[in-house]
Image: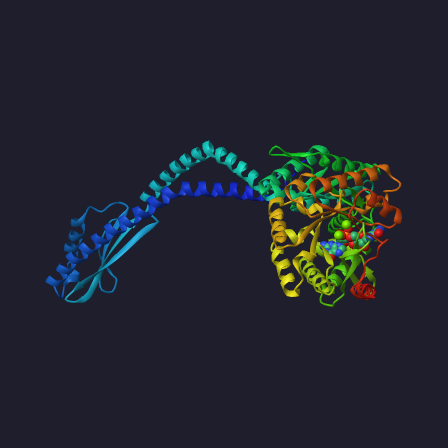
C-alpha cells in the first residue's frame, strides 16, 4: 500500500519546530557561560567598590569632623586618603564631592564606557557633608565574557554538530511511531478512519479532475464475529480481526486502501476502477477468502463476511460521507439478504431504509399500544387425532400496514433490544390464556437472545406463579441456534427451566447447525421436525429419508417428535405410519386468536357431555 502518512504536513511542521527549538537551545547553551560570568563578575566588582567607597567616605568624614568649618580646604589630605586605599587603576576613577556636588579631589582619569558607578555619602556631625564616587569601567570583564562566549560557542557548536544528528534520528523514529499510532488501528495495523476519509477525498478529487474512472467503496462486516468473541473470548476475537486484516491486505492492490472502521467493520477504497466488473470481482474474492476457516488457537472457525458497495462515477458523484453511508446501507441490505453476499447501493435502498426506520419507531411503541396478539395453533396426537395443546405464535397488528409476520419483526425487535420485553409479554400472555384451557399444553417460542440475556428461568417461574399455570403444561421451544454460543451457560439455564417441570422442545430441527452433539449434552423433551421436510415428504425421497432418520433419533433417545407444517392428509398418514406421535399444521388448524380456541374447546366439551 502507498503509505502517505496522514497528517504528514503536521509532522513536518513539528519536526521543523523541534529542529528550530534545538538551535535555540544550542544558542542559549552557548550564551549562558559568558552571561553568567559577566553578571557574577559585575556583582563582585560592585560589592568591592561599594566597600571601598564606604571606607573612603568614613576616612573623609573623620577629616571633616576634625575640621568642622574648613574641611573643604583639606583637599590634599583628602586626596591622600583616596590614594591610601588603593592605587588608582587606569580603568577606575575616584572622586570626593562637596555638599553641593563640587569636585574636591579626584584620582584617575575618565574610565571608558561601559561603566559602573557607586556613590556613598559622607556624613559629619550627623549631616551630609558630601559624597565619594567610584566609577569603574566594565570593559575588562566584558572582554573576558566575550572570550568565554566564543569558547563556549565553539564548544556547544562542536557538541551540537557531533550529537545533533543522533537525537534527530531518535526524534525521527519517535515521530514516525507517533504518526503511525495516530493514523493506524493498533490492533490490525491498518490505517484508521481519519486516513480513510482523507484517501477517499483524494480518490474522489482525482476522479473529478480526470473525469474518467470510477471509485468503489466497500463496507465489510463479519457475519459471525460476535459468536466467536462470545465463545472463544476477546483475545481470540482480536486474533481473528488480525487474521482478517492480513487476508484483506493480501487480496488488495497497492493502490487500494483497506481500513478498520471499528469493531468487526472494515472498509476498502478501490480507486481508478476502469472495468465495470472490477468491484464485483473484488467483492466475490473477498467473500471467498473470508469464507475459508480461520485457525484460532487450534480451533477452526468459520466467520464469513457481508459487503455493501457504493460507486462514485463521473462528475455528479456524492461526497465522501454520503458515499460511506450509501455503502453502509448496501451492507445492511446484504446482511438482510442472508449474509455471505455483497450488494451494490441502489437509490431504492434509501426508501427501504426509511421504511425500516419508521417500522423501528413503530415497533418500539407496539407493546405499549397493545398491538401484539398471540395466535394459537393446535397440536394433535397423530394416533388419536385429539388436540393435545397449542403453539403460541406472535402477531403484530400494525396500525397502517395491518398484520406483520413474526419472521420480519422478531429479528428487528432483537436488533433493537426490544425482545426481552416482548418475550416476557408473550410468556405471560400465553400462560394467562392457557390457564383457561384445562389439560392443554402450551408451547412458547423463545429466541436465543432471551435465553442468553440471563435470568430467563426466573421469568418462567414468575409467569407460572402469577398465572397459576401448572408447569407441566408449559413447553419452551428453542432453535438450535440457541446452543451455538455460550453452550454451557445455556444448558444450565435450560436445565433450571426443566427443573421447574417445564418441558423443552427443539424447534425447526434439521434446518440449523444440526450438530447432533447437542442432543447428547442436553436431553430435549421434544424434537419438532421442520416443515420443509414435511412439505416434500410425499415427493422427495431424501426428505422422507431425513424424516425417517429424525424419527429414528427420537426413538433412540426416548424423545417425542412433532411434525410441523402438515398440510395434507397424505402427509399425516405417512408420518403416522413412520411412528410420529404428534403433528401441527394447516390440516389440523391454522393459528387463530384465543377466542377461537375458547369456542373450539367449549364446543368439544359440549359434544363430550352429550
Ligand atoms: P415456528 O416456531 O416454526 O412456527 C411455525 C410456523 O409455521 C408459524 O409461522 C406457523 O404459522 C407456520 N405454520 C404452521 N402450520 C403450517 C402449515 O401447515 N403450512 C405452512 N406453510 N406454515 C405453517 P409464523 O406464525 O409466521 O411464525 C414464524 C416463526 O416466528 C416461528 O416459527 C417462530 O420461530 C417465530 N415466532 C413466532 N412467535 C414467536 C414468539 O412469540 N417469540 C419468538 N421468539 N419467536 C416467535
Ligand atoms: Mg415454534
Ligand atoms: Mg418451527
Image coords of residue 290 (percent x, y): 71, 36
| Residue displayed at 32% across by 50% down | 115
The residue positioned 79% from the left and 65% from the top of the image is 598
Give the x, y percent position of residue 114: 35, 49
The way the protein has been coloured in the rendering is rainbow
Residue farthest front in this picture: 610
Q: Is residue 434 among what the camera can see?
A: yes
Question: In the image, residue 98 lies at what x, y percent?
Answer: 22, 62
**The one of 430 and 489 positioned closer to us in this rendering:** 430
The residue closer to the viewer here, 403 or 389, is: 389
Question: Nearest the camera: 160 or 510?
Answer: 510
| Quadrant (top left, top right, bottom left, bottom right) of the C terminus | bottom right
Residue beneath the point at 52% across and 40% down: 19
Determine which quarter of the picture holds residue 36: top left
Residue at 63 percent of width and 53 percent of height:
497
Q: Where is 426 relative to 224, above or below?
A: below
- Residue 472 lies left or right of residue 397; in this view the side is left
Amino acid at each position: 500500500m502507498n503509505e502517505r502518512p496522514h497528517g504528514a504536513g503536521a509532522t513536518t511542521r513539528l519536526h521543523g519546530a523541534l529542529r528550530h527549538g534545538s538551535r535555540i537551545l544550542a544558542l542559549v547553551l552557548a550564551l549562558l557561560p559568558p552571561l553568567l560570568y559577566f553578571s557574577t563578575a559585575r556583582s563582585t566588582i560592585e560589592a568591592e567598590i561599594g566597600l571601598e567607597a564606604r571606607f573612603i567616605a568614613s576616612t573623609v568624614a573623620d577629616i571633616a569632623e576634625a575640621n568642622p568649618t574648613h574641611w573643604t580646604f583639606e583637599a590634599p589630605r583628602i586626596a591622600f586618603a583616596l590614594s591610601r586605599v588603593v592605587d588608582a587603576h587606569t580603568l577606575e576613577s575616584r572622586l570626593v564631592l562637596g555638599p553641593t556636588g563640587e569636585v574636591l579631589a579626584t584620582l584617575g582619569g575618565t574610565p571608558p564606557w561601559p561603566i559602573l558607578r557607586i556613590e556613598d555619602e559622607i556624613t559629619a556631625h550627623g549631616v551630609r557633608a558630601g559624597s565619594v564616587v567610584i566609577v569603574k569601567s566594565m570593559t575588562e570583564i566584558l572582554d573576558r565574557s566575550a572570550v568565554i562566549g566564543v569558547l563556549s560557542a565553539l564548544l556547544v557548536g562542536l557538541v551540537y554538530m557531533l550529537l545533533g544528528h543522533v537525537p534527530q534520528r531518535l526524534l525521527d523514529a519517535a515521530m514516525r511511531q507517533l504518526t503511525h499510532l495516530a493514523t493506524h488501528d493498533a490492533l490490525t495495523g491498518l490505517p484508521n478512519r481519519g486516513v480513510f476519509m482523507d484517501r477517499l477525498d483524494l480518490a474522489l478529487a482525482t476522479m473529478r479532475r480526470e473525469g474518467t474512472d470510477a471509485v468503489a467503496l466497500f463496507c465489510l462486516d463479519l457475519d459471525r464475529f460476535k459468536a466467536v468473541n462470545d465463545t472463544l473470548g476477546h483475545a481470540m476475537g482480536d486474533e481473528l480481526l488480525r487474521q482478517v486484516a492480513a487476508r484483506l491486505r493480501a487480496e488488495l492492490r497497492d493502490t487500494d486502501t483497506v481500513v478498520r472502521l471499528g469493531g468487526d467493520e472494515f472498509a476498502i477504497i478501490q480507486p481508478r476502477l476502469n472495468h465495470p466488473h472490477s468491484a464485483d470481482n473484488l467483492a466475490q474474492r473477498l467473500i471467498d477468502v473470508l469464507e475459508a476457516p480461520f485457525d484460532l488457537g487450534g480451533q477452526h472457525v468459520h466467520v464469513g463476511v457481508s459487503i455493501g458497495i457504493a460507486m462514485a462515477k463521473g462528475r455528479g458523484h456524492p461526497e465522501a460521507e454520503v458515499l460511506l453511508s450509501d455503502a453502509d446501507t448496501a451492507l445492511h441490505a446484504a446482511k438482510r439478504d442472508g449474509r455471505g453476499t455483497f450488494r451494490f447501493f441502489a437509490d431504492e435502498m434509501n426508501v427501504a431504509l426509511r421504511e425500516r426506520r419508521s417500522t423501528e419507531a413503530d415497533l418500539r411503541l407496539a407493546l405499549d399500544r397493545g398491538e401484539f396478539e398471540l395466535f394459537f395453533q393446535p397440536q394433535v396426537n397423530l394416533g388419536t387425532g385429539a388436540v393435545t395443546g397449542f403453539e403460541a405464535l406472535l402477531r403484530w397488528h400494525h396500525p397502517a400496514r395491518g398484520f406483520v409476520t413474526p419472521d420480519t419483526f422478531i429479528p428487528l425487535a432483537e436488533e433493537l433490544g426490544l425482545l426481552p420485553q416482548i418475550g416476557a409479554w408473550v410468556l405471560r400472555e400465553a400462560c394467562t390464556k392457557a390457564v383457561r384451557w384445562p389439560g392443554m399444553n402450551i408451547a412458547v417460542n423463545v429466541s436465543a437472545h432471551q435465553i442468553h440475556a440471563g435470568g430467563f428461568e426466573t421469568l418462567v417461574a414468575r409467569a407460572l406463579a402469577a398465572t397459576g399455570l401448572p408447569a407441566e403444561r408449559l413447553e419452551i421451544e428453542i432453535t438450535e441456534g440457541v446452543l451455538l454460543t455460550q453452550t454451557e451457560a445455556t444448558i444450565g439455564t435450560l436445565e433450571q427451566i426443566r427443573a421447574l417441570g417445564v418441558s423443552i422442545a427443539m424447534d425447526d430441527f434439521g434446518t440449523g447447525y444440526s450438530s447432533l452433539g447437542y442432543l447428547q449434552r442436553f436431553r430435549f423433551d421434544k424434537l419438532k421436525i421442520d416443515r420443509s421436510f414435511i412439505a416434500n415428504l410425499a415427493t422427495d425421497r431424501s426428505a422422507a429419508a431425513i424424516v425417517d432418520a429424525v424419527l429414528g433419533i427420537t426413538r433412540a433417545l426416548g424423545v417425542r417428535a412433532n411434525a410441523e407444517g402438515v398440510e395434507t392428509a397424505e402427509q399425516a398418514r405417512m408420518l403416522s405410519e413412520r411412528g410420529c406421535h404428534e403433528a401441527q399444521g394447516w390440516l389440523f388448524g391454522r393459528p387463530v386468536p384465543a377466542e377461537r380456541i375458547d369456542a373450539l374447546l367449549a364446543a368439544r366439551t359440549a359434544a363430550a357431555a352429550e
